[in-house]
């Protein structure tokens, strides 16, 4: 089986002590494609270094995370635009972008502006958008819908909405990122996974965060993708091999790697 981890922050300091071993564990588990969302200017160097060390395995994105929208956010956005202009083929997506109304509501308008500008970059460069929507799905989806006629696609990362919101995301042309939360006993995400067709789902870890059972509460890593895949297979009543095949195909198609051999 071949898996894709559509969202993993493997360049963070959480992996400083065993990064190479951790990536080897992922590869040994069949997790062959690792998609790296950016956070802010300070994370770009480590992310690109990892992508250069593991070409064809680690694929970097470019974007400004909503919780990193601070006083200098317009400078951050300019740096993102410049990076895309210098090396338009280096990045597989615009991400991680979006709206976060959980951690900080003091810069909602700035977050909206940053999100809208980065969606424009996704359209301009024909790249998918990887969208963070913590406590903010309706706000973010409204902005996406305004721009949706311009060919946007991508992933609603770490999807945690209700069934209507799941259907809305799919209707906008986006996949749902399914991570370790689906393995939690009290997770409402299980109903979403049962009912939304498999071709609209992709697997992710969000490592080092949100580790699946049996590692809940510990550091997450990309080698845990099979735990998520097996839970999705159980919920849908299908073989895990089918989950691997379909979700990996969907991820590669979203990230414009559809001609890659599985």
Image (tube, grey):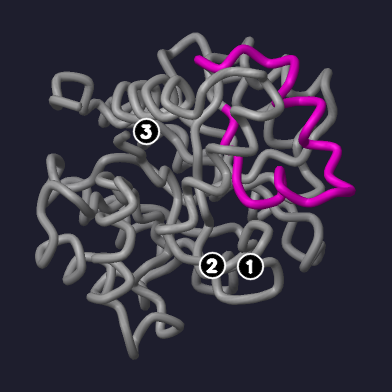
Q: Position of residue 95 (x, y in %)?
A: 43, 48
Contact between marks 2 and 1 (CB within 8 A): the answer is: yes
Q: Secondary structure at mark 2?
A: loop
Q: Is residue 259 left or right of residue 28?
A: left
Residue 177 within the magenta-colored segment of the rendering: yes
Residue, disc 1? 215
Mark drawn on residue 220: 2
The residue shown at (40%, 46%) is 5
Task: Give the mark nearest the N terminus, 2 or 1.
Answer: 1
The residue shown at (78%, 24%) is 165
Q: CA separation, marks 2 and 1?
A: 7 Å
Task: Give the mark nearest the N terminus, 3 or 2.
Answer: 3
Q: Position of residue 55 (x, y in %)?
A: 10, 54
Q: Is residue 98 left or right of residue 33?
A: right
Q: Secondary structure at mark 3?
A: helix
Q: In the depicted view, which residue is nearer to us: 48 or 143?
A: 48
Answer above or below: position of 107 versus 144.
Answer: below
- The boundaries of the magenta stretch are 176-199
Q: Is residue 64 left or right of residue 61?
A: right
């Amino acid at each position: 089986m071949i898996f894709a981890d559509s969202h993993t922050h493997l360049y963070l300091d959480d992996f400083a002590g065993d990064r190479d071993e951790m990536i080897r564990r992922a590869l040994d588990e069949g997790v062959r494609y690792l998609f790296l969302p950016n956070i802010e200017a300070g994370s770009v160097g480590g992310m690109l270094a990892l992508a250069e060390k593991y070409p064809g395995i680690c694929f970097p994105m470019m974007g400004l995370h909503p919780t990193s929208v601070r006083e200098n956010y317009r400078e951050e956005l300019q740096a993102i635009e410049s990076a895309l202009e210098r090396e338009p083929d280096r990045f597989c997506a615009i991400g991680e972008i979006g709206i976060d109304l959980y951690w900080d509501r003091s810069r909602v308008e700035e977050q909206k502006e940053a999100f809208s500008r980065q969606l424009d970059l996704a359209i301009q460069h024909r790249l998918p958008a990887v969208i963070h929507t913590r406590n903010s799905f309706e706000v973010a989806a409204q902005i996406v819908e305004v721009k949706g006629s311009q060919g946007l696609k991508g992933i609603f990362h770490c999807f945690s909405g209700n069934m209507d919101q799941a259907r809305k995301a799919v209707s906008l042309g986006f996949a749902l990122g399914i991570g370790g939360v689906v393995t939690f006993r009290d997770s409402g995400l299980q109903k979403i996974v049962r009912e939304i067709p498999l071709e609209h789902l992709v697997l992710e870890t969000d490592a080092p965060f949100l580790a699946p059972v049996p590692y809940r509460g510990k550091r997450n890593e990309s080698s845990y993708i099979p735990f998520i895949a097996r839970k999705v297979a159980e919920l849908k009543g299908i073989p895990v091999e089918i989950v691997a095949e379909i979700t990996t195909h969907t991820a590669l198609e979203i990230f414009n790697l559809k001609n890659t051999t599985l």
